[in-house]
């Protein structure tokens, strides 16, 4: 009974039956019958579907790896991104300072050295350089902004009339015409010997000396040239006193305190003078009430 029950467990599979039948056929009967051809065609279509997927992926990988190897071999940074915070130094000028005139090989890149090279120029306050693979170099610079020209007051006697720029932090730096075309009409501040240790690019003016001048320049920038004519010269004969020479020839006496309030009084005086058709030649804006004004005589 058990033998009859188990006799189906080892029954040949349908595939085995098919192969057994095919094995009894001749070569021609085996490979040229319609059943075999249908199975073969189905296998071909299946392989074709796989090929449509695998071949493009394989080609993409091949050329991608080939391109990456080529880029790694050449290691060229062809794109240069440049940003100047104050738009004073152009991309071409910065690249010229670095000596870059073509694409850069990554093996030649030394960001720290190049940053130091840029910051060694006294017109540049800070610089940052980094590479972004596969092919871009980023350069960022912050330029020094000229606030006033500076010249030693003693220059009229010594003959040394050299001019430098001063930034908002009292730092002196050279006048570079190709950088500073927009800053040619700034006032000249005449320094005294006690204002700094040495008159040269890179030197710093003492803070107590430059701070009122920076405040003065900032306050003047809030007015049009019709409201307050451009300031031509700035003197500080005493620690508390400032004397301005305006473009219209007027001389203005100020003090180092309440710069903003004094500039407001100066604008009102000039507006009043224009309204009455008079030309002020001397103005004292230190008094908060009834500042002193001397007008040019009629016909002068």
Image (tube, rainbow, N blue to C red):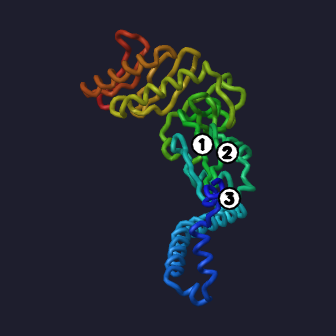
Residue 195, quarter of the rendered image? top right
Residue under numbered circle 2: 118
Residue at 69 percent of width and 32 percent of height: 203
The picture quadrant where one finds residue 249 is top left
Q: Residue at x 63, y 60 (%)?
A: 7
Relative depth, front residue between 247 and 46: 46
Is label 1 in contact with label 3 (beta carbons under 8 Å)? no
Q: Which of the two residues, 62 or 83, is positioned nearer the viewer here?
A: 62
Q: Tell me residue 96's x, y (percent).
A: 64, 55
Residue 100, placed above or below residue 28:
above
Judge left or right: residue 166 versus residue 215.
Answer: right
Q: Position of residue 74 (x, y in %)?
A: 70, 64
* Circle nearer the N terminus (1, 3): 3
> Is there a contact, CB below 8 Å, between mark 2 and mark 1?
yes
Q: Point out the image quarter for the C terminus.
A: top left
Residue 141 is tagged as 1
* Labels 2 and 1: the sequence-earlier one: 2
Of the residues under marks 3 and 2, which one precedes in the sequence? 3
Q: Residue 188 at x, y = what percent?
A: 54, 33
Mark 3 sits on what residue? 104
């Amino acid at each position: 009974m058990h033998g009859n029950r188990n006799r189906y467990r080892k029954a040949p599979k349908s595939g085995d039956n098919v192969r057994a039948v095919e094995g009894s056929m001749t070569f021609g009967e085996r490979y040229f019958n319609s059943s075999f051809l249908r199975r073969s065609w189905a296998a071909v279509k299946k392989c074709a579907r796989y090929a449509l997927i695998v071949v493009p992926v394989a080609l993409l990988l091949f050329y991608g790896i080939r391109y990456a190897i080529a880029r790694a071999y050449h290691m060229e940074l062809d794109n240069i991104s440049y940003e100047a915070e104050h738009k004073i130094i152009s991309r071409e000028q910065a690249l010229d300072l670095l000596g870059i005139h073509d694409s850069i090989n990554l093996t030649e890149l030394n960001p720290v050295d190049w940053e130091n090279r840029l910051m060694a120029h006294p017109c540049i306050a800070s610089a940052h350089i980094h590479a972004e693979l596969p092919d871009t170099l980023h350069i960022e610079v912050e330029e020094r902004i000229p606030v006033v020209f500076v010249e030693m007051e003693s220059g009229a006697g010594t003959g040394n009339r050299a001019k430098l720029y001063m930034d908002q932090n009292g730092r002196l730096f050279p006048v570079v015409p190709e950088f500073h075309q927009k800053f040619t009409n700034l006032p000249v501040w005449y320094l005294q010997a006690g204002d700094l240790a040495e008159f040269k690019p890179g030197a710093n003016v003492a803070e107590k000396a430059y701070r009122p001048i920076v405040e003065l320049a900032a306050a003047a920038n809030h007015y049009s040239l019709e409201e307050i004519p451009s300031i031509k010269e700035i003197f500080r004969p005493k620690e508390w006193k400032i004397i301005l020479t305006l473009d219209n020839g007027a001389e203005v006496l100020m003090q180092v305190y309440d710069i903003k309030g004094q500039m407001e009084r100066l604008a009102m005086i000039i507006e009043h003078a224009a309204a009455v058709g008079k030309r002020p030649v001397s103005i004292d804006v230190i008094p908060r009430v009834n500042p002193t004004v001397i007008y040019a005589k009629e016909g002068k």
